[in-house]
Amino acid sequence: MTDLAQQLADDKVPSELAQLVQTLAEVSQSISAKVRLGALAGVLGSAGEQNVQGETQKKLDVIANDLLKEALLRLPQVRAVASEEEDDVVGANHGGAYIVAFDPLDGSSNIDINGQIGTIFTVYPARDDVACDSDAQFAQPGRKQVCAGYMLYGPSTQMALTTGGPSRLYTLVPDQQKYQLTEAELRIAPECNEFAINMANQRHWSPVVQGYIANLQAGADGPRGKDFNMRWNGAMVGDVHRVLMRGGIFLYPANTQSKVHNGKLRLLYEANPMAMLVEQAGGSAVVGEQAILDVDPESLHQRVPVILGSGAEVQAFQALS
Ligand SMILES: O=P(O)(O)OC[C@H]1O[C@](O)(COP(=O)(O)O)[C@@H](O)[C@@H]1O
Ligand SMILES: [Mg+2]
Ligand SMILES: [Mg+2]
């Protein structure tokens, strides 16, 4: 078996970046231990505060955010961190080569029902032309990411990771406090017969999305000539994990009527890291016609529509646009 440290060395990941990834892995082990105990660890329920996006924070959102932030700010190679749960960029070490962004706890509505939740993270090179704590540090397109991944706190805790090469999957061995490599190269089949979308929002979708999903629902009798199944976890981390493991298409499209008209998912903390993992596994990730990784960020907490998964299926969606 190959553990995370060994694989990072084999992949010739620069030592400062490897150490940063190891720190994220260690923090995730603490989060995983708390998630395992749930109510017994006192981590369920609301924290009683709202984040910058007006969402009510769960206790675990705050706990995971604080653990990640404190551990990362101690690393000399970290110039700044940004989090879905922080209003502003937090400046760290001036000489640091990297900036780190994260969604500390993805799938917050699943916390109290013992459902799938996770942590999503991304690392970019630090910019020398702007201040440590400037939003502009993170105004870089997703193509600039040097590393992206997530931890999924499911029946087992797993970490998907790319450092620019293949997307790899590691599984936590709690007794050893170590991640072991369990899938050396994730590959998403181009064809699929499974889609993931929150159908409750159907009336708010654009005509293109309405038409595409109607074609899938028409199954073997419709224009696609085959039956599709549907799954929805309510946690992007769980839905994207399923797509990485067995193919499929995941959509969180623009919502033409509500306040989340540009979609719900955040470009920096959710869309870009997942897009990098999906592309490095041979799949596609788009906002419509454009690849997610090519979007020029406009603001720190910017939201974007997300369509990702099996390459041929994403193309079938784009063909209707
Ligand atoms: O409640 P909905 O509309 O199905 O939204 C689910 C989406 O919201 C999210 O939970 C948002 O993430 P957070 O829990 O980090 O806010 C995604 O993980 C998921 O895909
Ligand atoms: Mg999230
Ligand atoms: Mg979150």
Image (cartoon, helix red, strand yellow):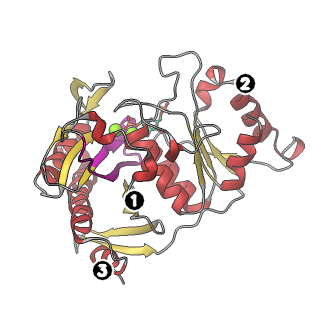
Question: Where does label 3 land, which residue?
Answer: 6
Q: Provide residue 57's location: percent of width, then percent of height.
A: 27, 30
Is the residue under label 1 in contact with that under label 2 (CB below 8 Å)? Answer: no
Cα gap from disc 2 to disc 1, whole angstroms? 38 Å
Say if mark 2 contacts mark 3, CB within 8 Å: no
Q: Quadrant of ligand 1?
A: top left
Report the disc number at residue 205: none
SS category of the residue bearing label 1: loop
Cα–Cα gap, marks 1 and 3: 25 Å
Which one is nearer the viewer's eye here, 72 or 124? 124
Give me the disc on residue 155: 1
Q: Quadrant of the N terminus?
A: bottom left
169 or 111: nearer the eye?
169
N-terminal label among 2 and 1: 1
Above or below, 152 relative to 261: below
Q: Residue at x 33, y 24 (%)?
A: 53
Of the residues tagged 1 and 3, which is closer to the observer? 3
Few, some or many residues within 10 Å of mark 3 (<14, 14–19, 20+) = few
**Secondary structure under the numbered disc 3 in the rendered image:** helix
Inter-mark Cα distance, 2 to 3: 49 Å
Q: Position of residue 4 (x, y in %)?
A: 31, 73
Quadrant of residue 286 in the image? top right
Per the image, the residue denoted by label 2 is: 207
